[in-house]
Image (cartoon, rainbow, N blue to C red):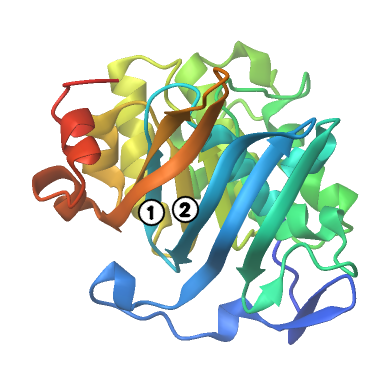
Amino acid sequence: MTEIETRLEAPSVKIGDVSLEHVAERPRPSGSPELREPIFQVRDVTVSYSGNPALSDVSLDIYRNCVTAFIGPSGCGKSTFIRCFNHMNALIPGATIDGTIMYHDQDLYGPEVDAVEVRKRIGMVFQKPNPFPKTIYDNIAFGPRVLGLNDNLSERVERALQQAALWDEVKDRLKASALSLSGGQQQRLCIARCLAVEPDVILMDEPASALDPIATTRIEDLMHELKQEYTIVVVTHNMQQAARVADMTAFFSVNQGAEGQRTGILVEYDATQKIFTQPADKRTEDYVTGRFG
């Protein structure tokens, strides 16, 4: 499983043999999130494990330069869904994905698509910080070195640490072990490691669930800053966090089958303010007001 993600520096990029317009050259629209360019278009996606559907018939668009949050009770398929965007579910034995996910108008699961190339430009930050047992500098430089991006490497490392709001705290100890950092610093280090190879999209699966309130605030502030350059998708159990950081919010819930089979479903997806103040579905209202979940 690789966390080395990148947006290739070229006039065009490819996923396998599929050409994509270089995303950095596209205009950055402003205004209401749903009026922006969709970066992902998801249609009728069902994810199954060993033939048992864990998530069923999900359709939505993820918009460029927005923070999109997935909320819902445990077991509703939020983490399963976010892993669809960079082929992480393909690493799980017995996992199958039906439906269509378009990324910049190209089928993310087309037969010619290289999953490793997908993960290079769609980065992921996990729930538990996982720094490599290397120095702070070598953690950030690891991805660029693997990809042969060795020119101006120290500048790239510094830029990534600055983007992750960590540079001022570690600039005088770059040769120290990354494991010597606090939990919140380690999580920002992992974000910087992702940013060092300039991804197009950053996926975050519960990035602050193991952190204290101060470190959580730093991560949330960082998301606000990073969306100026990146598209961010975040899974969170913390509804207040979703309300604070997200432009768009998707609420997932669980359908209970006749034989006890639990299947995640998308109940409602809209601008975050509407989800939390005027939800269209009673189930969403019950969840965000604490009546269940």
Kind of residue indicated by mark 1: Val
Seen in the picture, residue 251 relative to 110 is either above or below; the reply is above
Instruction: In this rendered view, identify the residue nearer to me: 87 or 269.
Output: 269
Whether residue 248 appears in this view of the structure is no
Kind of residue indicated by mark 2: Ile
Occupied quadrant, residue 253: top left
- Residue shown at 78%/23% (left/top)? 134
- Residue shown at 60%/78% (left/top)? 23
Residue 250 image point, x, y percent: 36, 48
Where the C terminus falls, by quadrant?
top left
Occupied quadrant, residue 30: bottom left
Q: Judging from the image, what secondary structure is the residue with disc 1 in?
A: strand
In the picture, measured across the screen, residue 3 lies left or right of residue 245, that is: right
- Residue shown at 58%/32% (left/top)? 189
Q: Are marks 2 and 1 in contact (CB under 8 Å)?
A: yes
In the picture, measured across the screen, residue 211 lies left or right of residue 1, that is: left
The residue under label 1 is 67
Instruction: In this rendered view, identify the residue nearer to me: 139 or 291.
Output: 291
In the picture, the disc for residue 223 is none
> CA gap, disc 2 to disc 1?
5 Å
Instruction: In this rendered view, identify the residue nearer to me: 4 or 111.
Output: 111
- Residue shown at 17%/22% (left/top)? 290
In the picture, the disc for residue 232 is 2
